[in-house]
Each structure stands twice: as C-alpha cells, then as structure tokens.
Amino acid sequence: MTEHDVRCLPESEFRASNDLFREAVHAPVATEEAWRVISSRYEPGRVWGDYLDGELAGTAMSLASSLTVPGGAELPAAAVTAVGVRADRTRRGVLTALMRAQLTRVRDRGETAAMLHASETGIYGRFGYGVATTSRTVALETARARPREDAPGGGRVRLLGPEEAGKLLPAIYRTVDSPGAGMISRPEGWWTLHLNREHTHGHRVRVAVHSDEHGTDDGFAVWVPGANDYRFGDGRTTLRVLDLHGADAAATAALWWFLLGVDLADEVVAVERPPDEPLEWWLADSRQCRIRDVYDELWVRPVDVAELLRRCRYDPAEPVVLGVRDRMLPENTGCYRITPDGAERSQLPPQLEMDVSRLAPLLFGEVRASTLAEANLIEVSDPDAVSRADRLFATRRRSWCGTHF
Ligand SMILES: CC(=O)SCCNC(=O)CCNC(=O)[C@H](O)C(C)(C)COP(=O)(O)OP(=O)(O)OC[C@H]1O[C@@H](n2cnc3c(N)ncnc32)[C@H](O)[C@@H]1OP(=O)(O)O
C-alpha cells in the first residue's frame, strides 16, 4: 500500500511545487525572471505536497478568492490551481490524498466552496466538483464584422501602459456593475501574473480602458497581438483577447468596436466569453461572430453545503427537499429544504437525491433538475419535485466566470 505524506509546504518548497506542476502540464520550468512573477500567487498555508518515499510526488495550491452565487452574494472561496503529479507517480492516489487535505483545510478556513478550471473533464467529479459555468471562444474578421447602426457603444477608449494598468484594472474590475453568478474576486497575485506575461509567456499584454460620457472608467480589454511574418506566414495578424469586462452593454460593446478598428489586425479572437454575450446581436451580420468553441469553464465544489444553499436566492416555486451525499466531506451529507425564501437543513425525507458534485451545476443554472433526472444523475422519490426544482433553480442570466486562474 502506498504511504502518503501530505504536507502544507513551507515557502522554501514553493519553487519545487511549481517546477513539478509545470512538468506535469508539459510547460517549460520557469526561469528565475518568470518565477519572480509567478511566486506572487503562492500564499503560505495554501500550497500542498504529497511525498512518496521522501520525494515530492504531487502538488496542489489555491488562491484566496470569493465566488458570486445566484442572488448576488459573494462567498469566500478557494481558487484551486497548479495541480500536478509526477508522471512516474500517477494513479497511486496522490491527487486523492491532496484533494482530501486541501478540501478539509478549505472547510476549516471557513471558505464555502472550492473552484477550479479542469485540464480534463474526467478528473474532478469524484472529488465533488461540478461544472458551474460555460464559456465560448469567438472569432471576428475585422474587415467584415460591423456593428449595427443602433448597437450600443459610445464613450472613449484609451490605451494604458503596464504600470497604470496594474493600478487601474483591479479597481475597475471590482466596480463592474452587479457581478453575475460565477464571477470571482481576483487576488493581487493573479493580477501580477495576468499583466506581466512578457516574463512568463514571452509577450507583453496590451490594455485599453473605456470611460463613459462622464469620464468614469467602466471597462477594459486585455489582449496580446499575434503577428504573422508577412514574408513567410499567411501575413495575418490576430488580436487574442484574454479579458474584456464592461460595467454595461455600452462599455463592453465599445471595447469590441475599438478592437475591431485597430489597424493592421485581420482578426479578433476572444476566449472565455459569456455564453449569452449579445455580440452576434450587436453586429449588422450576426454570422460574422464565429463561435469557435464552447467549453466547461468554472468547476465548483460546495464545501459548506448548508451555507452555500442558505446564501443563494431561488425563484418562486413550491419547496423541494434535496438529499445530498458527500463521501469526502461527510458532514455535508443530509437533507436540505429549499424555498424561494432560503434553504435550511431538514429532517424530512428527500424528494430528490444526488451526489454533491451535481449541486453546483444545478445551483448555477448550468443544468436543469429534469435533465439530471433524465440522465439518471439524480434519484427521484417525488416526480413532482423535479418540475418544482426546475423553477426554483431557474437563473435569469447564464452564469459566467471570465477569470482564468
Ligand atoms: C486545477 C488544475 O490545476 S487542472 C491541472 C491538473 N493537472 C494535470 O492535468 C497534469 C497532468 N496530470 C496529472 O498530474 C495527474 O494525472 C492527475 C493530477 C490528473 C491525477 O493524479 P493521480 O495522482 O494520478 O490521481 P489519483 O491516483 O489520486 O486518481 C484518483 C482517481 O482519479 C482517476 N483519474 C486520475 N486522473 C484521471 C484523468 N486524467 N482522467 C480520468 N480519471 C483520472 C484515477 O484513475 C483514480 O480513479 P479510481 O479512484 O477509480 O481508481
């Protein structure tokens, strides 16, 4: 039997943890210069390692963040990242041991949920994570994509240097109006890495800020230009948009029109866009918004189920009693009565029963209870409860995260 020795790593081991992770994802080991930037994300007490025979075999870490849930409450949440196991130590339970230690610590710290972006969809369901948000990649040809005459826009767009961007963007992000379900707070170390990619990815980001007619900054776009040598390549230049946020439709649309108007760019491709962003509806020819990909974005693991259910808001419908099973954090196992006014633990028998990994997809509106029932992913004792749950968990807007970590 494999002997696991899971430890919370001291700062002196952070670099080794990062090296191991980068090797596991086939990325080059960070240079000294890159490590100075990357290390800003590493927080004491949040980096884990599992040792087999005295050697570091796997690692996982998290950033202190928060998650907006349906109804608008922002709950403390751990943003799990940099998970990797040495290729010669996989399938021996290293990840399982790390996940158990990490989730237990997340719960003890009082964080309501853990969340991550998964490298593969087959990994994290067994640990209670489920897909909470979906994203899409869109591509627009600058020569053909034009706004409708009455499309939103206006205001002013200006370019920022990296230093100014580092000062302004975090504040603008925080003031983006009514953050929707699935959005997260961005730790300082996240911003450092995001805006200093020349040290880690070899290209410097470009940043534009939008301000409204009163001069208030209310949106920004971050992109990297990908130029193709016109003598050898196909001569096309693509602007790769990593991050675009606006307080309202006018700010978001104005940033799009700015990007489409940048000289010598043939295409604008943006990743991790909201699934219901009305971009195609803003264009004169909707087909010019090409959807390249649609993918699972944020995976959420309820850590304190009672608190998570209590802080969400629900649509009008008759109550439903949900039974939740949680093998890794058994204190979550039990029944919860959900009503439009809130949710609480209940001694009533469950009308619908599910593994904890189904809870986030349901709560964030990623899937309907009736779809889960048809897929045999929830057990139904009261068939009427399925349509009641469909109504209770209906979300008006699609959930979206928009922050890769
Ligand atoms: C949030 C992020 O950072 S995402 C990045 C994740 N990292 C990577 O993808 C890097 C490359 N992969 C790895 O480092 C490892 O293979 C990991 C982390 C995915 C898995 O680590 P392991 O130590 O092998 O996992 P462990 O042995 O605990 O496996 C637990 C279970 O998950 C299963 N499993 C592990 N990896 C995968 C996978 N990629 N796909 C499907 N199932 C998997 C195992 O078969 C095992 O199943 P069982 O309980 O039925 O026997």
Image (tube, helix red, strand yellow):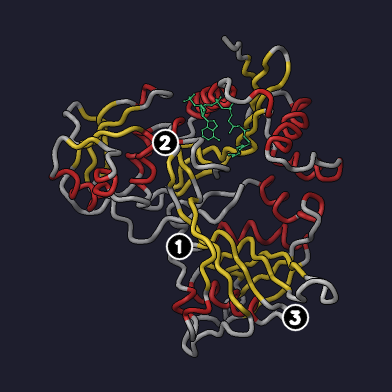
User: x, y percentage for residue 183?
Assistant: 49, 52
User: x, y percentage for residue 191?
Assistant: 68, 51
Circles 1 and 2: CB atoms closer than 8 Å:
no
Residue 175 occupies which quadrant of the picture? Answer: bottom right
Compare residues 374 and 146 and report the one nearer the observer. Answer: 374
Compare residues 124 and 167 and report the one nearer the observer. Answer: 124
Q: Residues within 10 Å of mark 2 (few under 14, many from 20)?
A: many
- Tag 1 residue: 275
Q: Secondary structure at mark 3?
A: loop
| Residue type, numbered disc 1 | Pro
Q: Identify the residue at horizontal 16%, vertical 35% (top origin).
A: 381
Q: Is residue 46 shown left or right of residue 195?
A: left
Circle count: 3
**Residue lying at the far bottom of the rendered structure:** 149
Compare residues 25 and 192 and report the one nearer the observer. Answer: 25
User: x, y percentage for residue 356?
Assistant: 36, 33
Q: Residues within 10 Å of mark 1 (few under 14, many from 20)?
A: some
Which of the marked residues, 2 or 3, is nearer the chain's N terminus?
Answer: 3
Cα gap from disc 2 to disc 3, whole angstroms: 46 Å
- Tag 2 residue: 302
Q: Secondary structure at mark 2?
A: strand
| Residue type, numbered disc 2 | Pro
- Tag 3 residue: 264
Cα gap from disc 1 to disc 3, whole angstroms: 28 Å
| Residue type, numbered disc 3 | Leu
Which of the marked residues, 1 or 3, is nearer the chain's N terminus?
Answer: 3
